[in-house]
Amino acid sequence: MRVADKYAEVRRTVAEIFEDNHRSYGYRRVQAALSRQRVFLSEKVVRRLMKQGGLYAARPKRRRYRSYVGEISPAPDNIINRDFHATAPNEKWLTDISEFQIPAGKVYLSPMIDCFDGMVVSWSIGTSPDAELVNTMLDAAIETVTEDDEKPVVHSDRGGHYRWPGWLSRVAKANLIRSMSRKACSPDNAACEGFFGRLKTEMFYPGDWRSTTIAQFAEALNAYIRWYNEKRIKGSLGYLSPIEYRESLGLTT
């Protein structure tokens, strides 16, 4: 005699949550997502159901784009000094460039990450890691600062993009404060590296990009980042997305 599976329906829900979120959720975030649907299960049960369903979150790989081209201008102090905690938005921003190589060519992403909640404040996507890529992103980030007393610290590696005249003049005009990692020391910008790692683990590495155009890949990146800001829940934010977290604190208009 066959025994009915009392978890049959919830198994389908768990699988949907897992698939709808770039196969990136482990059992804790799946449990939190279930509770949003008023389905309350213990971590032990959720972990068992995921294991039985073969639902395993992807593991990160290590590969990094390097933009260092030498000491072309004086570097500012490392003000951040690996302290990625911020008590409010627009206190500490992190930036870097990541490279994506698909059969159609190379694509570069330049984001600005807010240490307060990990929100991607602004980003630009292009086929060349040039001044236009980083300056466009910086201009968009500056537009999000609406209070006169907000002067974010902008932390980057020692790449040439952040030492060219266009970048320096924009930073100075907006009264931002520059901070740079030490030479060849990626842990000094670990929170930004963490964002790239999650993006590549959840969206890039699992994808099949063989028939994807550059434009289509750029749209996929845009869609992922919008999802990351609006829907991807984080344990450190009480299992809310960055935008939901800001809304819960009354920080959005």
Image (cartoon, rainbow, N blue to C red):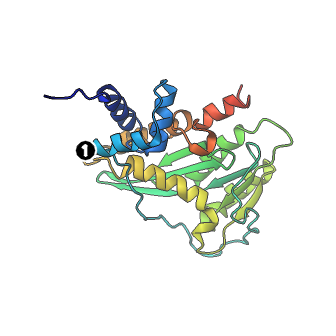
User: Percent position (x, y) of residue 156?
Assistant: 65, 61
Disc 1 crowd, CA 10 A, few/some/many (<14, 14-19, 20+): few
In the depicted view, which residue is nearer to us: 90 or 198?
Answer: 198
Q: Is residue 209 above or below residue 193?
A: above
Determine the residue located farthest toward the left in the rendered image: 1
Q: Quadrant of residue 148?
A: top right
For the N terminus, give its image quadrant. Answer: top left
Q: Is residue 136 above or below residue 6?
A: below
User: Percent position (x, y) of residue 170?
Assistant: 73, 51
Q: Is residue 67 left or right of residue 180?
A: left
User: Percent position (x, y) of residue 162?
Assistant: 65, 61
Residue at 74% of width from left, 28% of height from top? Answer: 250
In the depicted view, which residue is nearer to us: 55 or 210?
Answer: 55
Residue at 26% of width from left, 29% of height from top? Answer: 5
Count all numbered tags in the image, as a single digit: 1
Residue indicated by mark 1: 211
Amino acid tagged 1: Ser
Residue at 72% of width from left, 66% of height from top? Answer: 81
Q: Is residue 103 left or right of residue 196?
A: left
